[in-house]
Amino acid sequence: MHPDRTSTTRFSVPVDAALRAAGWLPGRWDIKQAEIWADTLREHASPAGHRHAVFPAAVEAWAEFGGLRLAPPGPGRQVAPAALHLDPLHGLHLARTLGDLGRALDREVSPLGEESDTRSLLAIDSEGRVYALDHTGDWYLGADIDQALAALVGGIEPVRLTAS
């Protein structure tokens, strides 16, 4: 069977449906917008001088998924699925918070977007792993953006990061 634009094996059916409803298609790549976000983040400094890290894994995630607003397609498997807005500027004023997480993880971390209902910040590290940061703690969502989207849209309970 020849693959076409109506089927994919990259994402589960519910995640694929949520992405497509938000305007994503395989091959989506808005590098111009990703570069605008990269420049905006690089130019921003907190009042205390904290700056954002910008690296290829973040720029690639922004180019493919940036700007999308995903609505949960139905009930989650373990927790309520998340409504998402994948716009890194949700983290513009959180350079220190992201820097602190990056130091704890021993890698750079950049904003990815937010969970719209809870205002949890989504972040991506230089290896492509995805996290959520909220008032209850820091959460690991997946080894890459695909796993993170599956967890968030599918309502899979994230793993809490613990200090060791």
Image: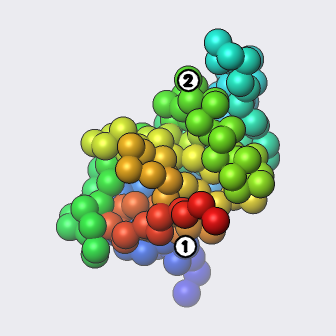
Dot 1 falls on a residue whose secondary structure is loop
Q: Which residue is mark 2?
A: 93
Relative depth, front residue between 133 and 156: 133
Q: Is residue 111 above or below residue 77?
A: above
Can you tell which quarter of the image residue 14 is in? bottom left
Q: Secondary structure at mark 2?
A: loop
**Which residue corresponds to the image point at 42% horizontal and 55% vertical from the top-left?**
19
Q: Residue at x 73, y 26 (%)?
A: 51
Nearest to the observer: residue 131 or residue 64 = 131
Nearest to N terminus: mark 1 or mark 2: 1
Point 31% across, 43% down: residue: 118
Q: Residues within 10 Å of mark 2 (few under 14, many from 20)?
A: some
- Observer-nearest residue: 161 or 111? 161
Residue extending farthest to the bottom is 1
- Whole-percent x and y of residue 112? 56, 43
Q: Front-most of 83 and 19?
A: 83
Say what amino acid the circle numbered 1 marks.
Arg
Q: Position of residue 108 (x, y in %)?
A: 75, 46
Counting other residues with Cα less than 10 Å from the Cα at mark 1, is it few (<14), some (14-19), or many (20 or more)? few
Q: Give coordinates of residue 150: x percent, y percent.
A: 44, 68
Q: CA distance from mark 1 to mark 2?
A: 33 Å
As drawn, 163 above or below 10: above
- Marker disc for residue 53: none
Q: Which residue is mark 1?
A: 10
- Residue 36, position as x, y percentages in the image: 68, 24
- How was the colour assigned to the protein in this rendering? rainbow
Label 1 or label 2, whichever lies nearer to me, is 2
